Amino acid sequence: MISTQSWSDARLLWDWQQMGHVPRRCSVAVGLGSHDLGVADTTADLYHRGFAPLIVFTGATSRTTQSSMPRGEAVHYYERAVELGVPSSAILVEPKARNTGENIRFSREALRTAKIDVASILLVSKPYEERRAYATARRLWPGVEIVSASTPMSLSDYIASIGDPHLVIDMLVGSLQRLQLYPEQGFMIKLPIPAAVTAAYNRLRDAGFTSRLIPAATCRD
């Protein structure tokens, strides 16, 4: 049973993790691989709406996607976008990245190899990963403008799509922890975290939403 306080804290983390950027036309859209095909859907929608002339999908497989996306996250994203009417010629597939840092570095390299000039990135992630993805890209891809985007949806709708409220709150807590720890590891820039958000994180952690936490000594993005 999830308490009223935990639900309130989870909504606070959900809302804060989103950057609130307004989509605008960028040099390229980068869809970050994950278990969530909604990232591919949103990236395809942004392409069709004229916000980017080119898409990079990035991601290998992980423990959470090896059964649902056996050909790799980027490949499954590519296939979904083509089903949604994006021409294959408008998509680059980066199939090796296994974490957010590699998503950014390998996408940058793929675009450099393709001789694509990049001044701005429409960075598409899961809703609760917007801030983490932004902070990582700011650290690893300096000199370009970053516009964050994700599927517009409420926490309750996202939980309904996943089917496991405890897991979703675990993921919210894990993402916030990385924003606390990873700047010291050099994986992302440091972003100010409001005291109310830190307090909500602490309460959720103490309430047992810990399956996505990592030991500070073994941090890696």
Image (tube, grey):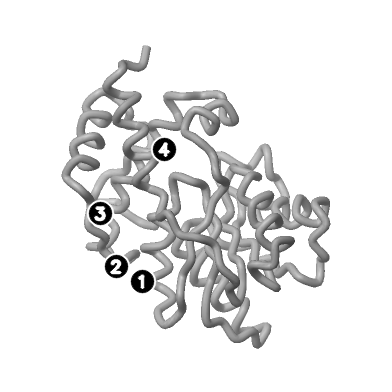
Q: Nearer the viewer, residue 203 or 212?
A: 203
Report x, y in % for residue 133: 44, 58
Q: Give the CA separation, mark 1 to mark 3.
A: 14 Å
Q: Give the CA separation, mark 1 to mark 4.
A: 22 Å
Height in image: 9 above or below 216?
A: above
Query: Of the residues under marks 4 and 2, which one precedes in the sequence?
Result: 4
User: The residue tagged with tag 1: helix, strand or loop?
Assistant: helix
Height in image: 53 above or below 4?
A: below
Labels 4 and 3 touching (C-beta < 8 A): no
Q: Nearer the viewer, residue 110 or 13?
A: 13
Q: In the drawing, what numbered circle is on residue 181?
A: 3
Identify which amino acid the numbered label 2 is placed on.
Gly
Q: Give the CA separation, mark 4 to mark 2.
A: 22 Å
For disc 2, the marked residue is 186
Residue occupying image coordinates x 68% and y 38%: 68
Identify which amino acid the numbered label 1 is placed on.
Arg
Query: Of the residues under marks 1 and 4, which one precedes in the sequence?
Result: 1
Labels 1 and 3 touching (C-beta < 8 A): no
Identify which amino acid the numbered label 3 is placed on.
Leu
Query: Of the residues under marks 2 and 1, which one precedes in the sequence?
Result: 1
Figure quadrant of the C terminus = bottom left
Identify which amino acid the numbered label 4 is placed on.
Met
For disc 1, the marked residue is 139
Residue occupying image coordinates x 48% and y 57%: 99
Report x, y in % for residue 114: 68, 83
Query: Of the residues under marks 4 and 3, which one precedes in the sequence?
Result: 4
Report x, y in % for residue 82: 81, 56
